[in-house]
Image (spheres, rainbow, N blue to C red):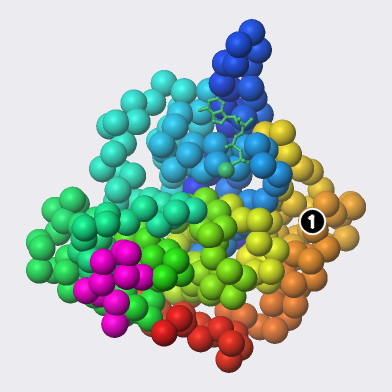
Amino acid sequence: MTGEPVLSVRDATRHYPSGDTVVKALDGVSLDVHAGELVAVIGPSGSGKSTLLLIAGLLEPPSSGEVRFRGARVSTPAVDLDRLRDFRRRNIGFVFQKANLIPFLTAGENVALAMEIDDVAPRAARRHAESLLTGLGLERRIGNLPARLSGGEQQRVAIARALANDPALLLADEPTAALDGRRGRQVIALFRSIADRRGAAVVVVTHDLRAADYFDRTIELIDGRIVDGRIGTTPASGEGGGRSLEPEMFRNETQHRRKSGATRSVQDRSWPGPVPCRSPDEDPIP
Ligand SMILES: Nc1ncnc2c1ncn2[C@@H]1O[C@H](COP(=O)(O)OP(=O)(O)O)[C@@H](O)[C@H]1O
Ligand SMILES: [Mg+2]
């Protein structure tokens, strides 16, 4: 992988005081993610996955260590996160387990609002929102309020909103946890295409091993540390190097995807169009 990573977390720790002791939510984590990469973060509950995303997304400072964005140091323990608000809005998209849409705004308005906050003219924001939602197969849902959308549709609106400002970095914390297997897989397929076609660096916290084949690599956190072994390196470069702690399913499916010639890192940043379908039962939700 050449060039400066989009995201570079360096030796990050995050400690929370808890009574007389300290919880080490993150305990010295380093992670680079390049443009066009889709990285899964797995690990048991409480292992620090959300904390890593909050620090990478400049929503919390590290207790020590730093976060770099395209080589520039943006976050350290002394950072004033309020001053990074505009930077965050322009460069980082977030998707959470719950879509958290504004209930009294339509799907189109929810997405457009993200741009209007960033000073895009309302009409242009509206047009772009419609094209994003259409690209996600939601053209017939643009005027719907969130309550009139299925869980999968709401999550796709949340993804459209996260993409509204064309972020170089997309961070998703268990975005498929509330979805059934098929819809969850569609959402991961969508992240794959965002990485490929927009060249975004994408990090997804997930428990869902069924979509493992879409990811370039997997890092596993346990007790705030990245588990060593092959995890954290690309599957190709890790071949034959020591015992892998990568779950068997991830390993096999990743290799399968690579052998099947899936393309990556296409750097045109135009919208990719509808969700790519791997099989007939994965059509975008009607
Ligand atoms: N704001 C906080 N205050 C105190 N402890 C926290 C806070 N956030 C997270 N923790 C603790 O840090 C550890 C890691 O949490 P988290 O990053 O949410 O894990 P995960 O997302 O992997 O489930 C847990 O032990 C959690 O209880
Ligand atoms: Mg979490």
- Which residue corresponds to the image point at 63% horizontal and 16% vertical from the top-left? 22
Q: Is residue 183 visible?
A: yes
Q: Residue at x 33, y 44 (%)?
A: 88
Quarter of the image where the N terminus is located:
bottom right
Per the rendered image, the range of residues in magenta is 139-149
From the top left corner, tell me how far across and down residue 20 is, in percent.
Answer: 64, 8
Q: Position of residue 97 (x, y in %)?
A: 49, 53
Residue located at (89% from left, 52% from top): 242
**Residue 85 found in image quarter:** top left
Image quarter for ligand 1:
top right
Horizontal relation, residue 17 to residue 73: left or right: right
Identify which residue is drawn at 37% across, 61% down. Answer: 158
Q: Does 178 appear in magenta?
A: no
Toward the bottom, the furthest residue is 280
Which quarter of the figure has residue 161?
A: bottom left
On screen, residue 82 versus residue 177, left or right, reads: left
Front in this rendered view, residue 16 or 69: 16
| Location of residue 154 in the rendering, given as x and y in whole percent from the top left corner | 39, 65
Q: Amino acid at mark 1?
A: Glu
Q: Which residue is mark 1?
A: 246
Q: How far across and how far down the image is residue 204, in percent?
A: 56, 56
